[in-house]
Amino acid sequence: MSQAVTIISREDGGLAVSKKMAKLNWKPGNMLYPVPAVLISVADSQGNHNVFTVAWTGTINSNPPMVSISVRPERYSYHMLQETGEFVINLTTKELVRATDYCGVICGKDRDKFKDMNLTAIPADLVRAPLIKESPVNIECKVVQVLKLGSHDMFLAEVVAVHVDDRYMDENQKFHLSDAEPIVYSHGEYYTMGKKLGTFGYSIKKEKSTRPNKKK
């Protein structure tokens, strides 16, 4: 069923124009887009490592800092997550978009995706999985719980270390992730982010007065 709604828009001269639009009722599905597309690096108990792409990921808690990734059990890297309970979330950028797509469609069982995509694996501080040097942010994680949801298992993990690329730090030690041109994923397509529209809390900030100061 579709439900008609009326939208009133104003044209020049204050005239109102009425348009009929409809809301289409689709079957339940994943329509929460855009989402981050991140590179997940993992390692098994023997030190063999792999990298794969995940879009079902997000922040789930602030204190302690926690994140989640959802992974299909049939994926090659799943057994590595099970063995060690550790992984690294590597944020992706415009420069990494081809690697992001490749690592999401190619299986690491018979391919070295780090070599194929010229990605540099460097040691992490607290987990066995490597960091990806080319990523602007690397988040070391240790799994605390696994939820079997259906098509995917959700790995809930505590963040144990964060690494950032000093190329994106300014003279005041502020990190500018936007300078790295991070990417998002939406309905099978990759996008860079658009221009900044505001900052947290801007909608309730008082506007600065533009009136000239009175002369004494």
Image (cartoon, grey):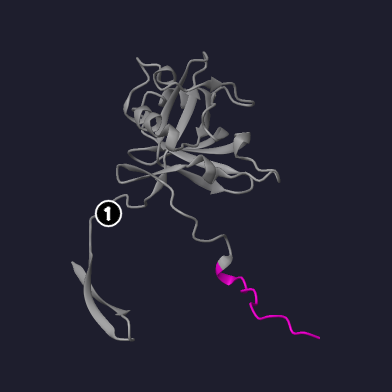
Question: Residue 98 location, x and y as percent?
Answer: 37, 31
Q: Is residue 96 magenta?
A: no
Q: Identify the residue at image location x=49%, y=25%.
A: 42
Q: Measuring from the top left, give residue 197's x and y in whole percent.
A: 49, 60
Q: Is residue 154 visible?
A: no
Give the quarter of the image for residue 115. top left
- Disc 1 designates what residue? 28
Q: Does the magenta stretch mainly form a helix, a strand or a loop?
A: loop
Nearest the eye: 190 or 39: 190
Residue 160: percent from left, percent from top: 63, 35
Query: Quick check: 119 left or right of 165?
Result: left
Magenta region: which residues? 203-216
- Residue 103 shows in this picture: yes
Name the residue nearer the viewer: 205 or 157: 205
| On screen, residue 93 above or below 195 | above
Residue 202 rendering spot, x and y as whole percentages: 57, 66
In the rendered image of this protein, does residue 132 appear above or below residue 182? above
Whether the magenta-drawn stretch holds residue 211 is answered as: yes
Within 10 Å of disc 1 (Cα), the crowding (few <14, some 14-19, many 20+) is few
Residue lying farthest to the front in this orientation: 215
Height in image: 12 above or below 112? below
Residue 91 relative to residue 169: left or right: left
Please identify the quarter of the rendering in which residue 152 is found.
top left
Q: Tell me the amino acid under the disc marked 1.
A: Pro
Q: Residue at x 47, y 23 (%)?
A: 119
Residue positioned most to the right:
216
